[in-house]
């Protein structure tokens, strides 16, 4: 089935990009090599995923309808503000109801890396969001929603998205995952949540750099 090939090639590409730099680091123990390899592979991963999604296409039930590029861009931009609002609300709940730290270890670690290796911003703000949307929204939400209720698929996708970030702020990442799934559902095109994710990461990094 096309859905199997489409999902498998995207997943394999993502795993290679994620694991290969770590294997290099385990061998050479060189931070510069690690982050250069991660950035280069991330950029390659973007183009490869778009290419594979085009060459081995599968239109899941969310993509059966089509949207204009204007609608996709609008949903992507509006979705950015929605995602930031949801992030603030869920973080508030984690801090004041669940007594978790307001500090994101992921963000702190990323900004430390960027301060030493500025080119890593390309990976953080572009490569990672694109690949994550292909995996967690296209594969784990859209493709799975072909077989089960979209709400169930969105929950599965969002929980996996939250676990993958391993930041401790599981509620926040899960809520963000649901928002991004909703944007994909409304846009019928994976490019909309990709736009939202990129813009959101850009704004977060820009605020941290102030």
Image: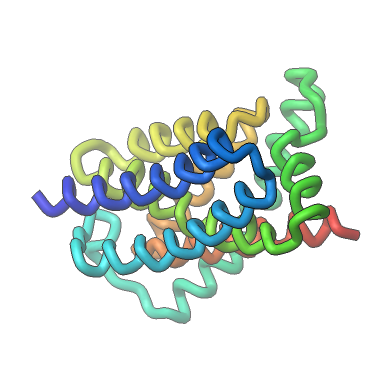
Is 8 in front, or is 144?
8
Residue plotted at (63% across, 60% down): 125
Is 82 in front, or is 203?
203
The answer to whether any part of residue 195 appears in the image is yes
Residue 186 lies, in percent from the top left, at 41, 60
Determine the image quadrant of residue 165.
top right
Farthest left residue?
A: 1
Residue plotted at (72% across, 46% down): 110
Please determine whether, in this image, residue 10 is positioned above or below residue 144. Answer: below
Farthest front residue?
A: 28
The answer to whether any part of residue 174 appears in the image is no
Residue plotted at (38% across, 79% down): 68
Determine the image quadrant of residue 187.
bottom left
Is 60 in front, or is 52?
52
Residue plotted at (19% across, 59% down): 58
Determine the image quadrant of residue 101.
top right
The image shows a total of numbered marks equal to: 0
| In the image: residue 71, left or right of residue 196 | left
Please determine whether, in this image, residue 98 is positioned above or below residue 50. Answer: above
């Amino acid at each position: 089935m096309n859905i199997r090939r489409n999902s498998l090639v995207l997943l394999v590409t993502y795993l290679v990009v994620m694991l290969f730099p770590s294997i290099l680091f385990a061998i050479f123990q060189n931070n510069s090599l690690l982050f250069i390899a991660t950035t280069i592979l991330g950029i390659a991963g973007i183009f490869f995923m778009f290419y594979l999604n085009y060459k081995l296409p599968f239109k899941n039930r969310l993509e059966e309808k089509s949207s204009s590029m204007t609608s996709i861009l609008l949903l992507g931009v509006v979705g950015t503000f929605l995602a930031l609002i949801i992030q603030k609300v869920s973080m508030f709940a984690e801090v004041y109801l669940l007594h978790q730290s307001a500090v994101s270890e992921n963000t702190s670690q990323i900004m430390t890396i960027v301060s030493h290796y500025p080119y890593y911003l390309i990976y953080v703000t572009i490569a990672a969001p694109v690949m994550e949307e292909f995996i967690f929204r296209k594969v784990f939400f859209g493709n799975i929603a072909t077989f089960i209720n979209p709400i169930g698929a969105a929950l599965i996708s969002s929980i996996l998205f939250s676990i993958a970030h391993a930041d401790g702020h599981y509620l926040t990442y899960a809520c963000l995952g649901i928002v991004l799934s909703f944007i994909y559902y409304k846009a019928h095109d994976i490019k909309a949540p990709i736009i939202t994710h990129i813009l959101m990461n850009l704004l977060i990094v820009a605020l941290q750099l102030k």
